[in-house]
């Protein structure tokens, strides 16, 4: 029934001296107007209601005013979110500026470079260590698409170097303890153990940590170092679980995976689905190669235009943080709210139904926002929801848009002047397109568990960008307790590695600072100038004529038993000698 807004009721309210006192008539009372019986209209509300001339339906509430207030509330929350994220990101940038560029990014290329014979100045010092720790905390809290797992490898390596040497040039601390370990070989072994312990603590995967150090980090290994590394990884995992137990509700110790998503007694997978897992491997390798390609060109642009200008690099990080926050805040508005009752939970899998509780965001009670449940929460919780065995939690459109957003924001975030790794962002991307493929397959075949595809997609994406194989498979199994999915994970990881290697190399071998692969036009003189700045020049010493004529005996500092080869020595044998002896240099006569 059409009609016009009862404006005399409002006009009488403020024309008759009632101070804007509004009482809804019994015919127009709703739960909202019932709460507004004693509400005094503000001048802003009166002005808004006077602008309404007519409507083609009976007005039971001031819908325009309510929509305006909701928009103002959204802007208020956006300002609060941007303010908090800006504070954390700024602190993270300042910590990198103070501690040096080695405290930024993941630090894995620097660790791999050192363990392969390239000593990067200040990469494992106390200054870089503390800068990395606190910058990582701030950057991870700022909402940037970074993960703590990569920097944990750098942190563990720095701790290993500090423990072995037990001295610091930063604090001018040179005790005489552990003198037998203060050599390059033992320091390298301690760094290898620290890198393995770091990834074990991050993923809760002691065996995976050992295999990562063997497969990806270290070039020189021994049987004795294997059991030492495994023992340290076990201690690191136990310590992490022990400390995290204080945040739980159960006093019992456990060693479950950090992203456990349940064991289904009703369904595993069919052998016919192995073809789908192969497709996930191809997609993971292609996306991983694309990520490496974009990351290389973006870092080249940074090197050419931003260089190491502190102001430009700081502005870049802040701009990326603002873009990330705005996209994460407004992208849920693209998709409609859904009823919480639409989520189907299998009782035999999800006992406490924690993963099924989604984020309401700005939706009405009883409804939830799909995109906010993935973007506006902690990444660990988002991964649990992607791995959860719940049906109809996310629509195909949401999963596709979420994957694209996370992929491209991870590309521009990688390489910023903040501490952060890529493991978690790549896991999110892989879980997103994996669950998308699983739900697409479920449209044609009944009984498809999309959470398995999310797990396999995660493994495929990580293999596609970092080209890890054995260690990655073990880490994923230990992380999720998905031993029953070992065959699909292995299949997807191997195919993703082959596809990625067809296009380019691993992102770890495309180091941003040139520690691993050096340019052909590398100048040794320039390297000496950069690395010897702390050494005083001869002109700085005040010698008299008698001291200038004296000779210094350097024989105590010479290595009289260095390994040498002739110029006719076989190159393949030279390579074997270099690898097996753990050499840093080999003199050719």
Image (tube, rainbow, N blue to C red):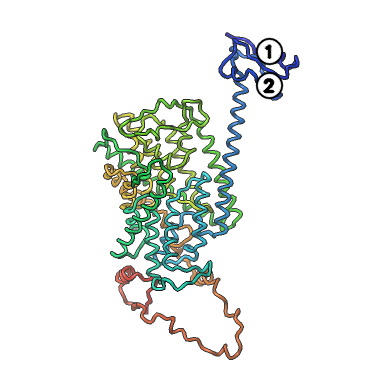
Q: As rendered, which of 411 and 583 lies closer to the eye?
A: 583
Q: Name the residue under label 2.
A: 41
Please tell me the numbered disc located at residue 9: 1
Residue 325 horizontal/vertical position (percent): 54, 41
For label 1, count other residues whose C-alpha is less than 10 Å away and answer few (under 14), some (14-19) or many (20+).
some
Residue drawn at x 38%, y 41% as measured from the top left: 250
Side of 367 relative to 561 (left or right): right
Estimate the x, y position of residue 417 in percent, counting from the top left. Answer: 53, 53
Residue 2 at what x, y percent from top left? 59, 9
Direction from residue 320 to residue 509 in the image, left or right: left
Task: Using a 10 Å C-alpha cutoff, classify the residue at mark 2 as few (fewer than 14 neighbours), some (14 to 19) or many (20 or more).
Answer: some
Q: Could one spot residue 200 in this view of the protein?
A: no
Quadrant occupied by the C terminus = bottom left
Can see residue 33? yes
Q: What element carries label 1?
A: helix
The Cα–Cα distance between marks 2 and 1, rounded to whole angstroms, is 12 Å
Residue at the (43%, 71%) spot, across then down: 177
Q: 127 or 52: nearer the eye? A: 127
Q: Percent position (x, y) of residue 6?
A: 66, 12
Quadrant in which residue 99 is drawn: bottom right
Measuring 57% from the left and 88% from the top, which residue is drawn there?
Answer: 548
Query: At numbered mark 2, what does the secondary structure look like: helix, strand or loop?
Result: loop
């Amino acid at each position: 029934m059409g009609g016009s807004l009862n404006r005399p009721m409002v006009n009488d309210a403020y024309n008759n001296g009632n101070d804007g006192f509004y009482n809804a008539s019994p015919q127009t009372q709703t739960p909202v107007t019932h709460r507004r019986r004693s509400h005094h209209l503000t001048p802003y509300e009166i002005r808004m209601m006077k602008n309404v001339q007519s409507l083609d339906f009976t007005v039971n509430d001031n819908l325009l005013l309510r929509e305006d207030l909701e928009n103002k509330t959204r802007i208020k929350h956006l300002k609060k979110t941007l303010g908090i994220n800006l504070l954390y990101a700024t602190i993270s940038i300042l910590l990198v500026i103070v501690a040096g560029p080695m405290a930024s990014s993941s630090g894995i290329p620097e660790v791999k470079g050192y363990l392969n014979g390239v000593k990067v100045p200040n990469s494992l010092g106390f200054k870089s260590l503390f800068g990395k720790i606190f910058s990582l905390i701030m950057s991870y809290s700022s909402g940037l698409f970074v993960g703590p797992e990569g920097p944990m490898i750098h942190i563990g390596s720095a701790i290993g170097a500090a423990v072995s040497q037990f001295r610091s040039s930063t604090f001018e601390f040179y005790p005489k303890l552990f003198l037998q370990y203060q050599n390059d070989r033992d320091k390298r072994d301690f760094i290898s153990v620290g890198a393995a312990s770091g990834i074990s603590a991050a993923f809760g995967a002691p065996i995976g940590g050992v295999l990562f150090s063997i497969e990806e980090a270290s070039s020189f290994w021994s049987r004795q170092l294997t059991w030492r590394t495994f023992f340290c990884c076990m201690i690191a995992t136990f310590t992490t679980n022990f400390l995290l137990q204080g945040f739980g509700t159960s006093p019992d110790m456990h060693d479950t995976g950090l992203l456990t998503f349940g064991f289904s007694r009703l369904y595993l997978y069919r052998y016919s689905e192995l073809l789908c897992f192969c497709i996930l491997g191809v997609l993971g390798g292609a996306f991983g190669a694309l990520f490496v390609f974009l990351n290389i060109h973006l870092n080249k642009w940074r090197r050419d235009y931003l260089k190491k200008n502190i102001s430009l690099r700081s502005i870049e990080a802040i701009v990326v943080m603002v873009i990330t926050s705005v996209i994460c805040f407004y992208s849920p508005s693209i998709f409609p709210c859904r009823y919480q009752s639409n989520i189907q939970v299998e009782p035999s899998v999800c006992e406490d139904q924690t993963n099924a509780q989604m984020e309401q965001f700005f939706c009405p009670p009883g409804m939830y926002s799909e995109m906010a449940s993935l973007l506006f929460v902690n990444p660990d919780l988002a991964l649990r929801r992607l791995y959860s065995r719940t049906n109809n939690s996310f629509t195909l459109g949401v999963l596709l848009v979420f994957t694209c957003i996370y992929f491209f924001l991870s590309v521009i975030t990688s390489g910023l002047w903040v501490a952060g790794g890529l493991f978690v962002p790549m896991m999110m991307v892989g879980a997103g397109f994996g669950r998308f493929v699983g739900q697409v397959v479920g449209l044609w075949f009944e009984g498809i568990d999309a959470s398995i595809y999310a797990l396999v997609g995660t493994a495929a994406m990580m293999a596609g960008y970092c080209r890890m194989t054995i260690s990655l498979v073990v880490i994923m199994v230990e992380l999720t307790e998905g031993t029953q999915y070992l065959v699909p994970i292995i299949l997807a990881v191997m195919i993703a590695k082959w596809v990625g290697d067809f296009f380019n190399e691993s992102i770890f071998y495309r180091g941003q600072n040139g520690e691993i692969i050096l340019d052909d036009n590398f100048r040794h003189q320039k390297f000496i100038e950069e690395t010897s700045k702390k050494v005083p020049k001869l002109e700085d010493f005040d010698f008299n004529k008698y001291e200038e004529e004296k000779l210094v005996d350097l024989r105590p500092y010479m290595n009289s038993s260095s390994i040498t080869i002739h110029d006719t020595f076989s190159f393949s044998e030279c390579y074997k000698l270099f690898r097996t002896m753990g050499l840093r240099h080999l003199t050719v006569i």
